[in-house]
């Protein structure tokens, strides 16, 4: 067991099946977020008494969260790179950085939302805000889930090392993390940037 | 061992370049919007295009979508995108 | 204290008291019998099982219970509508709305879909020569999420009121503004839980079919049941995700006060779009597997190779693809842009083409065959007859100007039952009769089967054919009565009689199961259908051992077993040596996760956040335990497999 490389762990039949299943889950998630984007775009102009996107968003802060999340995606890729080299401690370290960045992102998002709410932009204020919070909340919840999930995996990695069980799990978690990042790129562009145009 | 580390160095360079490109594209889009340098319709097309490039980078470099056998991963993604696109188009046309 | 409870109970409406009492009696009876025959351990072994055959049987069993419940509701609906200005029991107005809404919701989500998933579970691994599904644990989880969501929706009747905005739960009627009670919160939350399980099931079967086929079982050699279930799984993954968003949206509207679906501030059409983006593929999710089952049954009972196998596969794929592009035909009358309407009218007509291809292929398969009219085949023939009628009314409905006349009338009710009962319910009956021997080792009684078919089938046409006419005469759907002078009384009465005949048909089925289980001694062989079997499931013992295939089957053609018969052999060749077989552990975690979801859902429905939170915590705890578990499974040594296999052969 000890001498097997990570690549062999990932090529194991069950691991391959898990990865494939995860890709189909991503297919499902694409539909989920696609529909949420559809809702958002459909009601974007229905701002009612509330602020318009242009009045609401503060681009500088969003830029910061974007950089944080993009960086986390990068550190996650590095972690997988070390996973492939079977370097337990480095893998651990970079995944740790990843989830810390993820936590920072969540913190920034919570701060953003409380700010909006203080300005009177509540979830029930207008259809636009409802769709905005629905979309962003779903994404934020995914990030939170990812943080918790990867933390649990890191405990296992710490206890068991890189083996047939932990390697595929970590790899799949990294896919999840990158996917969340992809979604964020779209949110950043469609919601924030275009909202400001 | 030496050869391995050389090879792996290249890998990490690649990852880093991808990351840099993504940050650059994000920053570019950000500044374009911040200073509204281009007329809106064109600007929207441009930043959407930037986003697309970033997505492709993530999928290709970080997520390993080009597997050896089958192409099931891409198929799953295309299927989901197809349904999502239908939903988006008709929700906008509403 | 006792007085308070008694007062409360007596203050309840009589139908709820009745439901409560009957439920209590059933509960007590179940507990009594389980204790009397010392079956608790046995029950637990089923609950915790990860064997795909057992999970499939549980799916079938639980959905059958829901079928009975929703069937009783159908009878209540029909009794209320039997005469003009009728006042049957309490089922007028609000209560009637709850009745139709739960009837539709339960039938679609908790009967039609899971019945087919049950058959999928039993049959797919056997047909592709696999020892299990790709993810046995997730399979069990799917089951318990389905049961959990099902319990929630079924409990709504006695706990605060049922959903009452139709099975489509259109906003803004379904929003808090117009239906403030908990009823319409049950709908999105219960279905969310069940839907989550369904998505997992879909993914599970996709991966199973892609990765676990026996050596030589190429895609173009898979039996049509498996093919159709494969495409269905793909549809499930995408369509149920759209539903998940719709349900999430409705949940937010009701619990957190968003106004996206409100008529004044948002746009209620968003719900309709999302719902039907899911809704129409759902029609094919429940129809395609039935098509597959009929293909297998027709070919076996006609003793002929399926006509046009490639075109059948192609038609299934095409239907699955087009199925995502027709949903607006449910929204023709909301006044969308004309071009959009025309586009969707065209795609709707287009989808009739592959369906027509399939019908002709079935007919050609039978042509010149030595047909046996056993119950599975009878249901297949009944299906062709019924489904053609349903298809024709479908094309009528797809004609936009005409739809303005038919829309929301009993014509639609007739159409939807012709397709759903004609395809799905007939398909499930056909499949259950066909595979019962494989599941339980005994054949269902043929005489009772015929009684079952003829009463159910004739009752069906008596119930629903008049509804076409009622619809054309102008009777709207979802109304609890109609005036004396409209001339609808006679047709409605006929329809009600037919409904009771269908009920009798279902009773025959239940009696059949009882008699077969209790009194039939004879155990069937591998292939109980007069040595006409064609596909892999008939090459192994009935019921199969936990690992299905002791050695892997050799697949060199589409119909390995039939080809072996042709060559004069009794069975196909099994290749390879006996090997140690790895079986998944049984596990109670999915069960407790289901309970966690149930608790959480009640918390959400009644907006008691601590309850919701603790339910979610249970779920999360179970997930963490699962994550840390060592998944060793059970190893069956090859000697044991060999001995068992030898014993099975004589
Ligand atoms: C025992 C046989 C059945 C009878 C007698 C029956 C009767 C009815 C009637 C009379 C309605 C119309 C209610 C109204 O519009 O006022 C109805 C609606 C409906 N039924 Fe059935 N039904 C039966 C079986 C089924 C089955 C097996 C399914 C699906 C698997 C099903 C699905 C539906 C749906 C989706 C609706 C629409 C509910 C709504 O309007 O929201 N039914 N049924
Ligand atoms: Cu449809």
Image: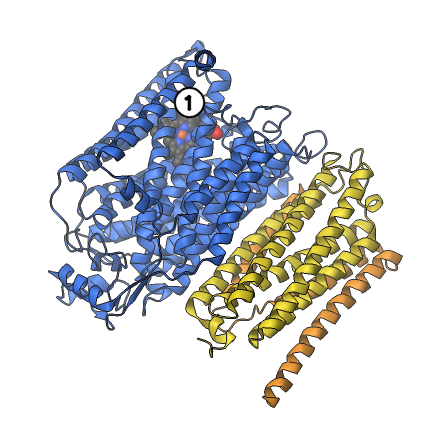
- Relative to B18, B80 lies left or right: left
Give residue C269's position: percent from left, percent from top. Answer: 63, 36
Whether residue C105 is visible: no
Circle 1 SS class: helix
Note whether A107 is above or below B53 in the view shown. Answer: above
Mark 1 chain: C
Whether residue C301 is visible: yes
Note whether C76 is above or below C330 in the view shown. Answer: above
Q: Is mark 1 within 8 Å of ligand 1?
A: no
Chain B pictured colour: orange
Note whether B13 is above or below C36 in the view shown. Answer: below
Residue matched to label 1 = C470
Quarter of the view holding residue C429: top left
Quadrant in which ligand 1 is drawn:
top left
Chain C pictured colour: blue
Quarter of the view holding residue C342: top right
Quarter of the view holding residue C184: top right
Chain A pictured colour: yellow
> In this view of the protein, which residue sits in the foreground, C261 or C310?
C261
> In this view of the protein, which residue sits in the foreground, C496 or C90?
C90
Note whether C358 is above or below C410 in the view shown. Answer: below
């Amino acid at each position: 067991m000890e001498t097997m490389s990570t690549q062999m762990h990932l090529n194991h039949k069950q691991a391959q099946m898990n990865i494939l299943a995860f890709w189909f889950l991503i297919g499902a998630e694409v539909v989920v977020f696609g529909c949420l984007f559809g809702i958002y775009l459909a009601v974007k102009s229905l701002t009612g008494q509330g602020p318009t996107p242009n009045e609401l968003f503060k681009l500088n802060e969003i830029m910061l969260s974007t950089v944080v999340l993009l960086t986390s995606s990068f550190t996650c890729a590095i972690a997988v790179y070390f996973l492939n080299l079977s370097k337990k401690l480095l893998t651990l370290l970079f995944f740790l950085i990843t989830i810390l960045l993820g936590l920072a992102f969540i913190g920034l998002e919570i701060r953003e939302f409380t700010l909006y709410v203080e300005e009177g932009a509540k979830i029930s204020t207008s259809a636009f805000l409802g769709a905005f919070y629905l979309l962003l909340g779903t994404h934020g919840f995914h990030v939170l889930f990812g943080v918790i999930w990867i933390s649990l995996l890191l405990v296992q990695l710490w206890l068991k090392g890189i083996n047939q069980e932990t390697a595929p799990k970590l790899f799949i978690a990294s896919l999840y993390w990158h996917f969340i990042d992809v979604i964020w790129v779209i949110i950043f562009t469609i919601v924030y940037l275009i909202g400001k145009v | 061992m030496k050869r391995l580390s050389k090879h792996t160095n290249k890998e990490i360079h690649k990852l880093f370049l991808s990351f840099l490109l993504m940050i650059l594209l994000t920053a570019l889009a950000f500044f374009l919007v911040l200073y509204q340098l281009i007329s809106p319709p064109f600007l929207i097309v441009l930043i959407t295009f930037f986003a697309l490039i970033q997505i492709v980078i993530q999928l290709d470099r970080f997520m390993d979508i080009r597997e050896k056998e089958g192409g099931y991963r891409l198929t799953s993604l295309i299927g989901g995108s197809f349904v999502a696109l239908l939903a988006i188009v008709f929700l906008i046309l509403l | 204290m006792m007085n308070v409870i008694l007062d409360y109970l007596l203050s309840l409406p009589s139908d709820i008291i009745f439901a409560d009492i009957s439920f209590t009696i059933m509960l007590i009876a179940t507990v009594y019998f389980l204790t009397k025959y010392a079956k608790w351990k046995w029950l637990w072994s089923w609950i915790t099982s990860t064997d795909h055959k057992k999970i499939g049987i549980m799916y079938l069993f639980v959905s059958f219970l829901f079928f009975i419940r929703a069937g009783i509701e159908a009878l209540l609906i029909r009794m209320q509508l039997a005469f003009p200005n009728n006042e049957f029991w309490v089922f007028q107005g609000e209560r009637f709305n709850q009745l139709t809404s739960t009837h539709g919701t339960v039938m679609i989500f908790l009967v039609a879909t899971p019945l087919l998933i049950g058959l999928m579970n039993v049959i797919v691994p056997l047909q592709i020569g696999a020892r299990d599904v790709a993810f046995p644990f997730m399979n069990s989880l799917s089951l318990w999420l389905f049961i959990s969501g099902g319990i929630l929706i079924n409990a709504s009747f006695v706990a605060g009121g049922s959903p009452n905005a139709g099975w489509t739960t259109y906003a803004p009627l379904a929003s808090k503004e117009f239906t403030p009670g908990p009823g319409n919160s049950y709908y999105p939350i219960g279905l969310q839980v069940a839907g989550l399980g369904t998505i997992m099931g879909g993914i599970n079967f996709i991966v199973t079919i892609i990765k676990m086929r026996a050596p030589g079982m190429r895609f173009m050699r898979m039996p049509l049941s498996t093919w159709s279930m494969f495409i269905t799984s793909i549809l499930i993954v995408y369509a149920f995700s759209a539903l998940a968003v719709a349900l999430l949206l409705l949940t937010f509207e009701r619990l957190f006060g968003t106004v996206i679906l409100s008529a004044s501030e948002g746009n209620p059409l968003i719900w309709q779009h999302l719902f039907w983006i899911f809704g129409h593929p759902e029609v094919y999710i429940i129809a395609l597997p039935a098509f597959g089952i009929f293909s297998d049954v027709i070919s076996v009972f006609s003793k002929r190779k399926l006509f046009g196998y490639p075109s059948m596969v192609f038609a299934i794929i095409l239907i699955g693809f087009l199925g995502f592009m027709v949903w607006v035909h449910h929204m023709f009358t909301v006044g969308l842009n004309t071009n959009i309407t025309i586009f969707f009218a065209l795609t709707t007509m287009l989808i009739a083409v592959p369906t027509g291809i399939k019908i002709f292929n079935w007919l050609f398969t039978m042509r010149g065959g030595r047909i046996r009219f056993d119950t599975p085949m009878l249901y297949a023939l009944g299906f062709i007859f019924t489904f053609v009628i349903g298809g024709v009314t479908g094309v009528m409905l797809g004609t936009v100007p005409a739809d303005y006349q038919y829309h929301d009338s009993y014509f639609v009710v007739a159409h939807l039952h012709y397709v759903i009962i004609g395809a799905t319910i007939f398909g499930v009956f056909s499949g259950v009769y066909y595979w019962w021997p494989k599941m339980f080792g005994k054949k269902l009684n043929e005489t009772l089967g015929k009684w079952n078919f003829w009463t159910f089938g004739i009752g069906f046409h008596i119930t629903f054919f008049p509804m076409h006419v009622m619809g054309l005469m102008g009777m709207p759907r979802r109304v609890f009565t109609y005036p004396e002078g409209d001339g609808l009384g006679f047709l409605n009465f006929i329809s009600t009689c037919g409904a009771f005949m269908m009920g009798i048909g279902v009773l025959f089925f239940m009696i059949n199961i009882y008699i077969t289980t209790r009194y039939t001694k004879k155990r069937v062989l591998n292939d109980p259908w007069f040595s006409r079997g064609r596909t892999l499931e008939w090459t192994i013992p009935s019921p199969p051992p936990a690992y299905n295939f002791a050695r892997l089957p050799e697949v060199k053609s589409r119909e390995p077993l039939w080809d072996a018969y042709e060559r004069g052999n009794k069975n196909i060749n099994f290749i390879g040596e006996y090997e140690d077989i790895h079986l998944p552990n049984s596990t109670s975690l999915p069960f407790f996760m289901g309970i966690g979801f149930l608790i959480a859902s009640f918390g959400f429905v009644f907006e008691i956040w601590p309850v919701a939170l603790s339910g979610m915590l249970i779920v999360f705890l179970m997930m963490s335990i699962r994550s840390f578990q060592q998944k060793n499974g059970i190893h069956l040594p090859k000697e044991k497999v060999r001995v068992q296999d030898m014993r099975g052969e004589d």
